[in-house]
Image: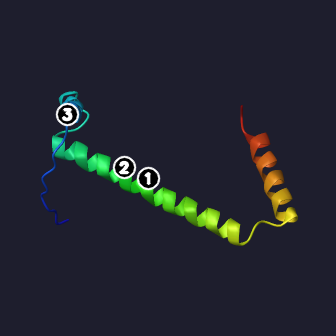
Amino acid sequence: MASEQIAVRLPRELLHELDELVRSGLYASRAAAVRAGLQAIAEIERRREVDRSIVDGYTRRPPLPAEDAAALESLRDAIALEPW
């Protein structure tokens, strides 16, 4: 995969935390830690977009009472099957 180098300024406190992540062995380098952080942020934003789409769909077409009842029954069945 092609990549491009960027320069980022960080406050000293954040840079110290970044270096601690590397020093502890959690990440191989500063760049690896920053990449992991950006990937996590991107994943969170993708999930938020899916959530917004679901809310939008239910706002445009709320579930019917029978659909609500079926969903609750399905949830009860799933909980009853749990081994706890």
Dot 1 alpha-carbon crowd within 10 angstroms: few under 14, some 14 to 19, many 20 or more: few
Amino acid at dot 2: Ala
Q: Where is residue 9, by image quadrant? A: top left
Amino acid at dot 1: Ile
82 lies above or below 68: above
Q: Where is residue 46, by image quadrant? A: bottom left
Q: Mark 2 points at which residue?
A: 40
59 lies above or below 34: below
Mark sitting on residue 28:
none
Element assignment for label 3: helix
Q: Which of 57 and 27 is in front in this view?
A: 57
Q: Disc 1, disc 3: CB below 8 Å?
A: no
Dot 3 alpha-carbon crowd within 10 angstroms: few under 14, some 14 to 19, many 20 or more: some
Identity of the residue drawn at 23% across and 35% down: 14
Q: Which of 29 and 84 is in front in this view?
A: 29
Mark 1 vs mark 3: in front: 1
Q: x and y percent of residue 6 in the render?
A: 14, 56
